[in-house]
Amino acid sequence: MAFVTKTDTGVKTVIKGFLTGGTQASLTYPLDFLKTQLQLQSKTSPEFSGMAECAKKTVQKHGVRALYTGAGARIVGAGFQQMFRWGTYTNLVNLARDEKTGKVTTTMTIACGMGAGFTEAVFAVIPVETTKTRVGDDLRRGTGNYTGSGDAVLKILKSEGPLGLYRGAIATVLK
């Protein structure tokens, strides 16, 4: 990301970031869903032996759309992740740029990257991952607590408050 030029604007990078993240998540979400299902299954009596079996059983039981359960949060969330990462980084680099030389020191480049990563984690990664995991687990268990990502966010906020979306926040920020 150190290749941000003086002409790059926060608005341009925010839009590019959002579109990039959303597109990437749309294409890869079924694999992410399957990974989460495998992680959430019982270790003592696993339901699936691998990704192929997980996909087959999920589609047989719930249909192809089930592979996109929780995708709304992930797709929008990935857009926000990239938006926060690139937008924050671009703005911080432009603030850190030496006015005379137009260059950014290595130390400031690292600091800007850390600031962008922190912003991305706090405002996008943590709430999205919490929502995605809960919706996927709900489908796997068949509890029917959530009708989708938006419903999950509203119910989490209502029952646990905003901090309910931030479980595991410290570990995510440190990562």
Image (tube, rainbow, N blue to C red):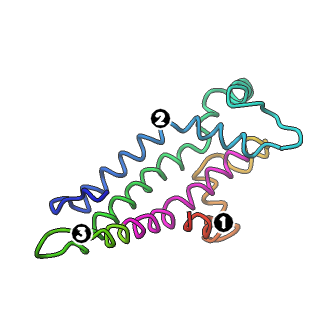
Dot 3 amino acid type: Val
Q: Secondary structure at mark 1?
A: loop
The residue that disc 1 covers is 167
Report the amino acid beneath label 1.
Arg
Q: Which comes sooner in the sequence, label 2 or label 1? A: 2
**1 and 3 marks in contact (CB < 8 Å):** no
Label whose residue precedes the other's in the sequence (1 or 3): 3
Q: Position of residue 149 (x, y in %)?
A: 59, 50
Residue at (33% x, 72% y) in the render? 107
Residue mark closest to the camera, 2 vs 3: 3
Q: Is residue 145 left or right of residue 77?
A: right
Amino acid bearing label 2:
Leu
Q: Secondary structure at mark 2?
A: helix
Callout 2: few (<14), some (14-19), or many (20+) C-alpha neighbours within 10 Å? Answer: few
Q: CA distance from mark 1 to mark 3?
A: 35 Å
Instruction: Tell me the number on the disc at residue 27.
Output: 2
Does residue 100 show up magenta in the picture?
A: no
> Is 157 rendered above or below residue 132?
below
Q: Quick one: label 2 or label 3, which is nearer the N terminus?
A: 2
Write the start and end of the magenta stretch as one range: 113-137
* Secondary structure found at label 3: loop
Q: Which residue is mark 3?
A: 104
| Image quadrant where one finds the C terminus | bottom right
Query: Is 116 inside the magenta-drawn segment?
Result: yes
